[in-house]
Every structure is written in C-alpha cells, then in structure tokens.
Image (cartoon, rainbow, N blue to C red):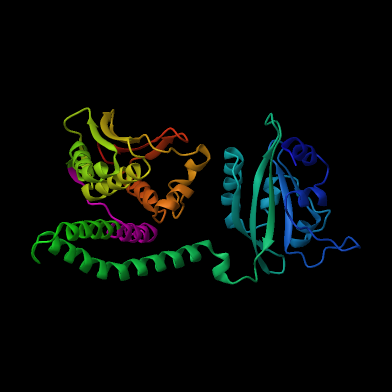
Amino acid sequence: MGESEAVKRYQAPAPGIAFWRSQGVACHRSAGEEVEAPRLGCWEWDVVNDRVLLSPEMYALLELSPRAPCEDLAAFLALFHPDQREGARKLLWEAAKRRQAFEMQLQRVHADGRMRLLRAQGSVLEDAHASRLCLVGTCEDVSEAPAEATSIEALEAMRRDFVNAVSHELRTPLTAIVAYVEFLEEDEAGNLTLAQQQYLKELSRGARRLERLVQELLDFGRFGTGTFKLECTPGDLALAVAEIVDSFAESAREAGVRLTARLKEPALECSFDAERIGQVLINLVGNALKFTGKGGEVVVSAHRDGDRLVCEVHDTGTGIAEEDLPRLFQRFSQLPSGQRLGGMGIGLAVCRAIIEAHGGEIGVCSRNGEGSTFWFTLPVERA
C-alpha cells in the first residue's frame, strides 16, 4: 500500500479491518461481529488534526463502549495510568517529529481496580506532501506474559551480567597467555628461529586483539551499571595521536596501506583520560586499516576548532552505505562487511560512550565505495 493510499484510508471515518490487515496486524472477528477474547487492538492518531481513532478490537481490549468518546490524544492517554501519560505524550510527539517507529508499555487501570499491561508500538505514515501525518499503532495485552519477557530492562540486565561474567572468566587465562608471550619476545627462553619468531608474532597479535575485545566487554558492563569512571589529567592529544599511529606502523606496512599522522599544531592540550582516548584511537585506526585495501591510505589528523579539539581518521576504503550509518554506534550491531572480518559489534559503541563521558561528540561521514572519515571532539575546558 503506497503512502497516498494510506493517507486516503486514514481520512476515512473509521479505520476498517482492511486497513489494519494491510498494516500486517491480525485483527480477528467472529461471524457475528463480536470480538472474542481480544489481546490486540489497533489505533491511529491524526497528528495535524489531533484526532484519535480506535479499532473495534481496541475498544474491546480497553473494555470501552464503542460510543465512549476518545476524540484526541489527551483523551486517549487519559485511559492509562496517570504516571505514564506525560512520558507517552512526549514519546509520541518525538516519533511524529522524527518520523520514526515507537514502542512503549502502558498500564490500563479499570474501574474495579484491575490492571492490564499493554505493549504499544507502531510507526508513522504521511503523504508525499507531508500535509497529512498520522501515527498507526497497536496495543497488545502482555499482562500474563512472564515478567522477564515484558521488561526490556530485565533482559538488558541479564545480557549485561552474562557478558560481564564471561569477560572476567576470559581475563585470567588471557593474562597468563600475554605474560608468556612477553617472556618469549624478550628471548628469556633462548633464541628463536625465524619460523618460531613468526609464530610468536602471530600469537602476540592474536593475544593483543583478544585482550582488547575482553576490555571492550568489561567496559560494556561498566557503562550499563554506571560504574565506568574517567581518570582525566592534562595531556596532549597531538602526542597521543602520534604514538598510536606509530604503534600501527608495522601493521600498515604488512597490509600495504600508507598510514600517516597529519597534525596542524605541535601541541593540542586539554584534560582527558589518556588510556581511554588511546582506546578510541586504537579502535578507529584499527578499523580504518581493516577496511582499506592494499594500496590505500589512512590519515589521522587533529586540530583545534574554537573551544574544542577535533580528531579525524580518514581512509580510502570500502565506505559505508548511507542507510547503514545509524547502526554503526549501536551495541552488538555489525554490518555484513564487519561480520566477515571479525569482531563483536561493540567497539564503536564503547568509543561513543567514552567520548560522550568526556563531554565530546563522535560521528562518521561516508559514502559507499568512497572511503570514510570517523571523527570525535573533546572540549578544551571540561565542565
């Protein structure tokens, strides 16, 4: 169904079963037009005219008479718990403004004191000229579902606890592996043959990569529990960039990629957590090398822009499609190209959390096939 048809249907006096089914919603009726044990109802809100329409199933779900008035958004939200009305109103207005899907949970309190938990979700429809805008949604009764299944917070906590437990279990044996690798690299066990040196090099590279992954998992857990803390001291961002670029020099040579640091000013001083900003730089430069083919180039630059410092990591690699950009900084979200090259999809999410904890911003500019520029900012004076 096209947008113009959706708007035409939207202007009809009542939604109609055909409309809701066209939206992929199963609204069941008996032959006698009586709703049987409804668990799902449909509604729509005309944002421009502030008019709310309910399907017959929605009236039955809320145990309302079809003649009960529900003329506007305020009247619709008045059917739910008073503590939820303002938050729901803001969420729906934000969804309309941003033209984005929405989801929330609402409690319907009946006159006899019974409470019903509903999961509300939907999306935005508008015509080609944006003269008609409506939110189309459903409400599903989830009162009898297990508490764990109806609580996004509970599910998130379970995942966070699992990740944290696995991370700590990996950390102990990994520490031993890294220690023995360093022991061998220092020739403490005797001279190694060229072949053995190469094996040790690959072992060291794998151990360091695993060490970074475990650190990202631990950070993920700290961000979720609010235990993540920065240790900021006066530092030089230009020096930090130069050191990270130098540490990737050998990896860049092996990949056949030219890696350079472009620093417009000899010193870029501000207060930051050197270890955490180093972690961000390692992630961004490592990704740039990973997605840049042989003969390509990666340039890391930093400069002052008013009351903030700006760092950019530009590559001539594969680039990113525009529709995939919003997913990049989401946790456990990977594009197909990233899945092929390994990783867990939390590195950029951790980078975002670190930069935002500093009071800065992080983002990306990219086009498919034209390379990418990842950037972040740090305030010169922290609040």
What stretch of residues is rendered in magenta? 210-234
Q: Is residue 62 visible?
A: no
User: In the displayed structure, would residue 207 be above or below residue 264?
Assistant: below
Q: Residue furthest right?
A: 32
Image position, residue 200 (x, y; %): 20, 60
Magenta stretch: includes residue 216? yes
- Foreground of the two, 343 or 141: 343
Residue at (26%, 52%) from the top-left corner?
Answer: 230
Residue at (45%, 47%) from the top-left corner?
Answer: 337
Image position, residue 279 (x, y; %): 27, 49
Magenta stretch: includes residue 177? no
Residue at (78%, 68%) from the top-left corner?
Answer: 37
- The quarter of the image holding the N terminus is top right
Q: Is residue 97 visible?
A: yes
What secondary structure predominates along the stretch shown in magenta?
A: helix
How many marks are shown on the rendered structure? 0
227 with respect to 246 (left or right): right
Image position, residue 301 (x, y; %): 27, 33
Residue at (33%, 58%) from the top-left corner?
Answer: 213
User: In the displayed structure, would residue 189 be above or below residue 287?
Assistant: below
Image position, residue 300 (x, y; %): 28, 35
Q: Quadrant of residue 150?
A: bottom right
- The quarter of the image holding the C terminus is top left
- Foreground of the two, 40 or 253: 253
- Foreground of the two, 364 or 91: 364
252 with respect to 104 (left or right): left
327 with respect to 123 (left or right): left
- Foreground of the two, 354 or 131: 354
